[in-house]
């Protein structure tokens, strides 16, 4: 997988909030970006973990640390998924 280098200027206060120790600011920025893409349903948890170089369990721990829900489907989405699954089971047993 290719990479793109991006240079971003951040206010010092924001940089300190992202990485108080100052030891891995780039890593914290990448975590924030990937977490947001996951939260916006633009990336799976598996892909997010892969991009961060961590296990999926570690990614779930990261979500908890940042108070980002893993399961963020609406009731309507859950019910629609259940209907699709029920129809598939019906077709498979026919």
Image (spheres, rainbow, N blue to C red):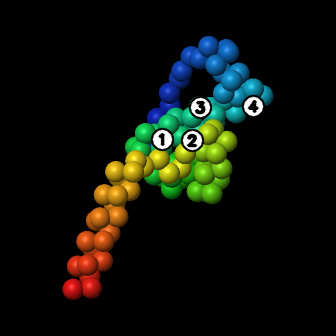
Q: Secondary structure at mark 4?
A: loop
Identify the residue at horizontal 56%, vertical 16% (top origin): 9
Dot in front, 4 or 2: 2
Decide which of tag 1 and tag 4 comes sooner along the chain: 4
* Residue holding disc 2: 68
Asked whether disc 1 touches disc 2, contact meaning CB atoms under 8 Å apart, the reply is yes
- Tell me how far mark 4 sits from mark 2, CA to CA: 24 Å
Which label number is shown at residue 29? Answer: 3
Label 3 crowd (10 A; few <14 / some 14-19 / many >=20)? some
Q: Where, quadrant-wise, is the C terminus in this rendering?
A: bottom left
* Residue holding disc 4: 23
- Tell me how far mark 4 sits from mark 3, CA to CA: 12 Å
In the depicted structure, whether residue 81 falls above or below residue 12: below
Residue 16 place in picture, x, y as percent: 71, 21
Residue 25 visible at all: yes
Decide which of tag 1 and tag 2 comes sooner along the chain: 1
Of residues 59 and 4, the one nearer the viewer is 59
Identify the residue at horizontal 68%, vertical 15% (top origin): 13
Residue 8 place in picture, x, y as percent: 54, 21
Q: Secondary structure at mark 1?
A: helix
């Amino acid at each position: 997988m290719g990479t793109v280098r991006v240079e971003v200027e951040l206010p010092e206060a924001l940089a300190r909030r992202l990485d108080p120790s100052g030891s891995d600011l780039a890593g914290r920025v990448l975590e924030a970006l990937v977490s947001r893409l996951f939260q916006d349903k633009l990336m799976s948890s598996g892909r997010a973990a892969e991009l961060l170089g961590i296990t999926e369990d570690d990614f779930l721990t990261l979500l908890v640390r940042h108070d980002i829900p893993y399961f963020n489907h609406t009731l309507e989405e859950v019910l629609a998924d259940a209907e699709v699954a029920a129809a598939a089971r019906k077709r498979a047993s026919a």
